[in-house]
């Protein structure tokens, strides 16, 4: 009798006390490797030795470049052979989701997210603690979502949204993060002194968020009030570069920031705005000054 082969039960032998066991069967994870051609489509079953991966699969790219043009998902990279190389290009209409695996992106030469493409870590599983350990470029119009640990050079000319969750998260930066011209960083804010933030903990870290927009998004009905404070980065080590007047930091309901502790400590405070009568007084004083100067002449 012929027994059908099930992809989800593909065995990787592990010998213990003379018994052949399967790590994939034990943990419900299948393994599949990209076999080419270079620049081949992720969604072509012929390009994988075990069919197109899904959210239960641990994968290896086998040193090839893989192109994503539609909606795809995977579990993790092969933790047994993490440095097999390869690269991922996500083009317009492409969306690649890591299903919460800890080794979400590592061992590759690069990840490129082009306009209309998205690379997403799903925080719903394994606590959302996923490492982005691959040099990653987010082009204008591209989107990078999730990832709590940024451990390689990340250049963002598109959108980086760390999470979209119900509570604030700390994003650990241990290499280089550059928010470039046209780029946008979105941090969720849940209340006074309760926002997503960067942790810059390595002596070799370089965090540059001067390129374009930092957008703070109120969640759960929160609206900012005068003197509410947000700590957006902790500079324990490394270097942080920001625009000193925080003119690129935007939040609905905030007209002005108190930037006293912005460059040194990453802290912004919602500043009070003068009442209209105060503006009128300033205008009157200015007009009086002009009149006096004319009279002197």
Image (cartoon, helix red, strand yellow):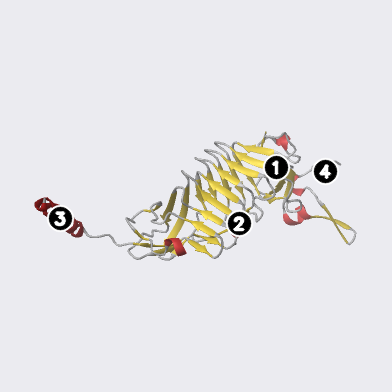
Element assignment for label 1 = loop
Identify residue for label 1.
86
- How far separated are the C-alphas under marks 3 and 1? 69 Å
What residue do we see at 17% from left, 54% from top?
A: 286
Is residue 146 visible in the rendered image? The answer is no
Q: Which mark is residue 125?
A: 2
> Which residue is at the front of the view, 124 or 93?
93
Q: Nearer the viewer, mark 3 or mark 1?
A: 3
Identify residue for label 4.
3
- Estimate the x, y position of residue 211 in percent, counting from the top left: 46, 48
Is residue 46 visible in the rendered image? The answer is yes
- How far separated are the C-alphas under marks 4 and 3? 95 Å
Q: Nearer the viewer, mark 4 or mark 2?
A: 2
Query: Badges 3 and 1: C-beta atoms under 8 Å apart?
Result: no
> Which residue is at the front of the view, 77 or 99?
77
Determine whether 131 is above or below 52 in the image: below
Mark 4 surroundings: few (<14), some (14-19) or many (≥20) residues within 10 A: few
The image quarter containing residue 253 is bottom left
Element assignment for label 4 = loop
> Which residue is at the front of the view, 217 or 227?
227
Element assignment for label 3 = helix
Query: Badges 4 and 3: C-beta atoms under 8 Å apart?
Result: no
The image quarter containing residue 284 is bottom left
Q: Which mark is residue 289?
A: 3
First of labels 3, 1 by sequence position: 1
Query: Badges 4 and 2: C-beta atoms under 8 Å apart?
Result: no
Mark 3 surroundings: few (<14), some (14-19) or many (≥20) residues within 10 A: few
Determine whether 160 is above or below 236 in the image: above
């Amino acid at each position: 009798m012929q027994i059908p082969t099930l992809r989800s039960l593909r065995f990787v032998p592990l010998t213990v006390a003379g018994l052949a066991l399967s790590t994939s069967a034990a943990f419900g994870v299948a393994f599949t490797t990209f076999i080419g051609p270079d620049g081949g489509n992720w969604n072509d079953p012929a390009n994988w030795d075990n069919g197109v991966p899904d959210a239960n699969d641990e994968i290896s790219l086998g040193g090839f470049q893989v192109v994503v043009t539609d909606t795809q998902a995977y579990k993790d990279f092969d933790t047994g052979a993490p440095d097999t190389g390869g690269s991922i290009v996500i083009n317009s209409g492409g969306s690649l989701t890591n299903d919460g695996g800890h080794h979400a992106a590592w061992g590759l030469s690069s990840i490129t997210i082009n306009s209309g493409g998205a690379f997403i870590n799903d925080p719903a599983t394994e606590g959302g603690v996923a490492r982005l350990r691959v040099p990653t470029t987010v082009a204008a119009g591209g989107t990078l979502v999730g990832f709590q640990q940024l451990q390689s050079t990340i250049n963002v000319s598109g959108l980086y949204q760390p999470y979209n969750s119900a509570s604030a998260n700390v994003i650990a930066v241990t290499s280089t993060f550059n928010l470039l011209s046209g780029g946008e960083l979105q941090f969720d804010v849940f209340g006074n002194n309760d926002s997503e933030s960067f942790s810059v903990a390595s002596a070799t870290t370089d965090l540059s968020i001067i390129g374009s927009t930092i957008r703070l998004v109120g969640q759960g009905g929160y609206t900012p009030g005068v003197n509410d404070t947000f700590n957006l980065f902790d500079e324990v080590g490394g270097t942080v570069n920001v625009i000193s007047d925080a003119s690129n930091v935007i939040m609905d309901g905030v007209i002005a920031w108190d930037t006293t502790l912005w460059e040194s400590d990453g802290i912004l405070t919602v500043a009070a705005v003068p009442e209209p009568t105060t503006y009128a007084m300033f205008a009157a004083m200015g007009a009086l000054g002009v009149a006096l100067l004319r009279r002197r002449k």
